[in-house]
Image (cartoon, coloured by chain):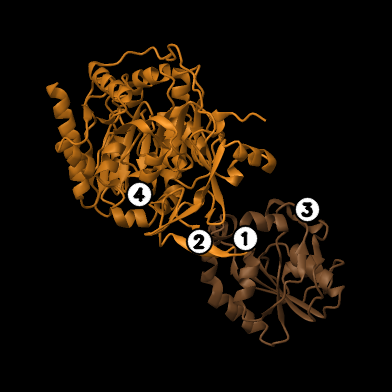
Amino acid sequence: MKQTNSGTCADCQYWEKSSYRSVLERNVSLYGYEPFMQDYMARWKYRGDYVLGKVFEADFKKLFQQYFRDAKHVAVPIPLSTERLAERGFNQAGELADFTGAKRKDVLGRKHGEKQSKRSRLHRLTSDNPFYLLAEPPKFAVLIDDIYTTGTTLRHAARLMKENGTVYVAACTLIRG
Amino acid sequence: MELDPKRYAGKRLLRHEIPLPTTTLQQALQHHHFKQIPAIRKEKSGSHCNRCNATQPHLKLLTCQICGDKHLYCRNCIQMGRVSACAHFYEWSGPEADWPRHDQPCAWEGTLTTHQQAAADAIEQAMKQSGKLLVHAVCGAGKTEMLFQGVTAALEEGKRICLATPRADVVRELLPRFQHAFPKVTVQALYGGSLDKTGDGQLLLATTHQLLRFYHAFDVLIIDEMDAFPYHADPMLHFASEKAKKPRCASIFLTATPRQKEKRQIAAKTLPHVFVPLRFHGQPLPVPVAKICFGLHKQLKKGNLPKGFTKWLHKRNNPTRQLLVFLPTVELADTLQAEAQRALYPFAQKIMPKTRGETLISTVHAADIDREEKVQAFRNRETAIILTTTILERGVTFPSVDVAILNAGHDVFDEAALVQIAGRAGRSPADPAGEVVFFHEGRSDAMDKAVQSITEMNRRAKRL
């Protein structure tokens, strides 16, 4: 992650200059994306070793409660496409959303496309919004995902929700890539 | 659509491992060309994974969004793709694969020594009778060549053969040798990340992990380096190799360093075995020399090469031999890298006066993505010195090298590892000597036993 002196990271400064200005309030994460964490994620997410998620339960809950204690916040996990879900059998973001201790609402659906991790940065930044709404989004939403890399995914989801009545969207992610 | 039995025979596969559209697979099931079996079977004693046979505590609950249920999945063999209770294995039950009967398939033209010949005869006999045989042959005895006669006979009878080994490096090394020896036979290599994926060859070279995908597949199963990690200590891999055999199947085990269990079975005469104590070129094994280096641990910790080691480098018998330096850990390889480049450069230059640059010295370890290229570069004599962890301890042949172990007293260097490492030296008939030096600061039992065992083999060879 690029550090800056302004209290806002370089990534967010970039986004604030784009058409995605003030779409996402903030993002908080627990860990950096170290080689160990990459291996761990590979086994948890891609190999599908479900129980490995449990390790994060207490700390992730603490993180969420630290920043979004107010009961008005609703956890909205970033979904997988139906096809991807059928392949993996579980959505790691859904797992994390259950850990938060907050109310969970699955209001987002996702079109099937390439894996984000297989895309280049530029390709991600200019890609189309893959999300659609399944239900009315909550007024105060905290998006939950495993990894924040470029922030594109979260901002796509945030924008869609803001256009449909959400007042406040922040993000709580396990890892900041 | 006609399905090729060769592609699926002897395999137990998950749905995603079968590249067929669902309709085709459904038809095949209706025609009883495939049999569906549950991925995890329930027995009185508990649940078992139908691929690796694992039970609790390896089976864990998963809230599955494919079937909507909470059910078990297997963590034990998850690296081969997850086995979930709501899925199925597909087993070929169509017509049997008709493997060709080859007429004189062997193109290898070398000759065997009398000892190799005796072992080759025993191997052929065991293969014919679908028996069991342990071949105990010293490093550099020419194990691979001893197999050719038996493999030839098996191929002439239209049998399917698999040579499995715990180490992917060994598979990669053996592939071209078998391809040259059996040019008309479909020889395939299977390991994590291999180019061949289909496994529809008649003669397969595979890592022992790959055996997990097979079921009643082979007439002959050869386990090379049977005492190596991870095979020797992993019940899953033993199960996998049993499962991959046809009910009538020959089992040939190859090793240069049998473990206690096999030694006991040999002594009790419960495991038929044949012993080849002499290298194919007839010269004795180089006996390791232990050199104590005071301050070795301290120097290594600081990222410096031990003084005794550099001193030895100055007075090697043959300063043009390539050098294999074994290190106990990856971390040490990292800390030594900079110093090694600097301090070893003059010696590397002596080995290869014509080449220059940093590529003269390289470092390799298990997780290294360039591992294959680096080992190949050393084999091609493009690299003068290679620093390695124990991954190069066995199965790889470099014609003319000296071998040094830094901190030979470390736990990772058990007796078998030390004997194997020492066995890298003096492999070539043109240069059968080679030096092997254990640099240590306090000798271990394993070091003593390794030296004893090598001396003993040389003694037995001399008596012949």
Residue type, label 2: Leu
On the same chain, marks 1 and 4? The answer is: yes
Residue density around tag 4, few if under 14, some if 14–19, many if 20 or more, within 10 Å = some
In three-dimensional space, the C-alpha distance between marks 1 and 3, rounded to whole angstroms, equals: 34 Å
Dividing the picture into quadrants, the one containing residue A15 is: bottom right
Residue type, label 1: Cys
- Left or right: where does residue B171 sit relative to residue A174? left
Which of the two discs, 3 and 2, sits closer to the camera?
A: 2
- Residue underneath mark 2: B72
In three-dimensional space, the C-alpha distance between marks 4 and 3, rounded to whole angstroms, equals: 46 Å
The chain displayed brown equals A
Residues under numbered marks 4 and 2 in contact, where contact means CB atoms less than 8 Å apart = no
Residue A137 in the image: above or below residue A131: below
In three-dimensional space, the C-alpha distance between marks 3 and 2, rounded to whole angstroms, equals: 38 Å
**Colour assignment, chain B:** orange
- Residue underneath mark 3: A123
Residues under numbered marks 3 and 2 in contact, where contact means CB atoms less than 8 Å apart = no
Q: Mark 3 lies on which chain?
A: A
Which of the two discs, 4 and 3, sits closer to the camera?
A: 4
Along the line of sight, the residue nearer the viewer: B315 or A169: A169
Q: Tell me which residue sits at (60%, 36%) in the image.
A: B31
